[in-house]
Image (cartoon, rainbow, N blue to C red):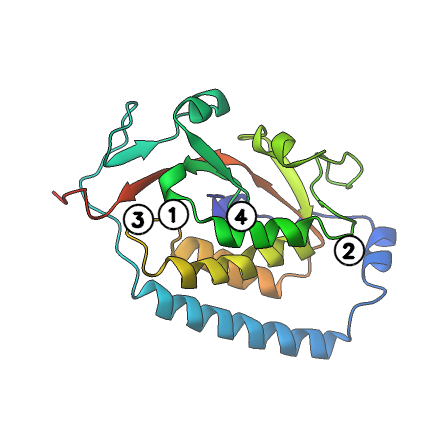
């Protein structure tokens, strides 16, 4: 899961801003729609979270995975050896049984569409958006390495995360989706920055019907 503290508005050249903003709606309507969608998203996510299981007290990270609890380690090699999979929607490696594939596939199709503002697969290694990251495999290897993406992708990540919350409400696993992430997404709807950065990572999950709270 992306640490919400990592999301920052990045400066871009005035010339680039003019080009990127050429087809944007008027500030008044943009602000009105942004506020509407931010409020709608926040209320919906809060309602959904009220039905999701709380974090389990007393569960600790270990180096050795178990049937009840599994961590993907601290490198892509360890993650692969433990059967973890790269979750494109959250840019993290996580245990296979904790994955939710339907929303990931929808997000993947969206990312690879040529209709994207900066072309298909809009991930970059540099702030200016010149060093294109080749594919999903290359992105998955960039654990703890800064990666840039346009605001369009950033907002889509939040919208597809909304879809995921609906789908996982009945799943008996804990996914790393908390208020910090929701706050970051709702703030993102109001942010006018064009290029933002994030990092891929490795996380754990719990099988809620198998882990006893202490």
**Label 1 – label 2 distance at C-alpha:** 29 Å
> Quadrant where the C terminus lies?
top left
Pointers 3 and 2 in contact (CB under 8 A)? no
- Left or right: residue 203 compared with residue 89: left
- Left or right: residue 54 compared with residue 118: left
Secondary structure of the residue carrying numbered label 4 = loop
Secondary structure of the residue carrying numbered label 3 = strand
**Label 1 – label 3 distance at C-alpha:** 10 Å
Q: Which mark is residue 173?
A: 3
Residue 137 on image: x %, y %: 62, 31
Q: Which mark is in front, 1 or 3?
A: 3
At horizontal 30% and vertical 23% (from top left) the residue drawn is 63
Sooner in the amino-acid sequence: mark 4 or mark 3: 4
Q: Mark 2 sits on what residue? A: 117
Circle 4: is it few (<14), some (14-19), or many (20+) Cα within 10 Å?
A: many
At horizontal 46% and vertical 69% (from top left) the residue drawn is 42
Between residues 188 and 203, which one lies in front from this camera angle? 203
Sooner in the amino-acid sequence: mark 1 or mark 2: 2
Q: Mark 1 sits on what residue? A: 176
Q: Mark 4 sits on what residue? A: 89
At horizontal 37% and vertical 43% (from top left) the residue drawn is 98
Circle 1: is it few (<14), some (14-19), or many (20+) Cα within 10 Å?
A: some
Circle 2: is it few (<14), some (14-19), or many (20+) Cα within 10 Å?
A: few
Q: Relative to 52, is 214 above or below?
A: above
Sooner in the amino-acid sequence: mark 4 or mark 1: 4
Sooner in the amino-acid sequence: mark 2 or mark 4: 4
């Amino acid at each position: 899961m992306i640490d919400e503290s990592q999301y920052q508005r990045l400066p871009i050249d005035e010339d680039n801003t003019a080009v990127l903003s050429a087809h944007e709606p008027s500030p008044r309507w943009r602000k009105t729609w942004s506020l509407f969608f931010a409020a709608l998203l926040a209320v919906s996510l809060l309602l959904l979270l009220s039905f999701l299981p709380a974090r389990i007290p007393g569960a600790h990270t270990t180096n050795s995975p178990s049937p009840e609890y599994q961590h993907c380690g601290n490198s892509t090699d360890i993650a692969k050896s433990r059967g973890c999979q790269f979750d494109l929607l959250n840019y993290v490696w996580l245990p296979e049984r904790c994955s939710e594939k339907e929303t990931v596939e929808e997000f993947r199709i969206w990312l690879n569409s040529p209709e994207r503002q900066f072309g298909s697969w809009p991930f970059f290694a540099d702030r200016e958006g010149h060093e294109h990251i080749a594919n999903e495999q290359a992105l998955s290897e960039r654990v703890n390495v800064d990666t840039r993406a346009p605001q369009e992708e950033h907002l889509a990540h939040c919208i597809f995360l909304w879809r995921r919350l609906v789908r996982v409400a009945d799943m008996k696993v804990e996914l790393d989706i908390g208020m910090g992430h929701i706050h970051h997404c709702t703030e993102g709807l109001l942010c006018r920055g064009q290029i933002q950065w994030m990092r891929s990572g490795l996380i754990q999950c719990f099988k809620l019907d198998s882990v006893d709270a202490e």
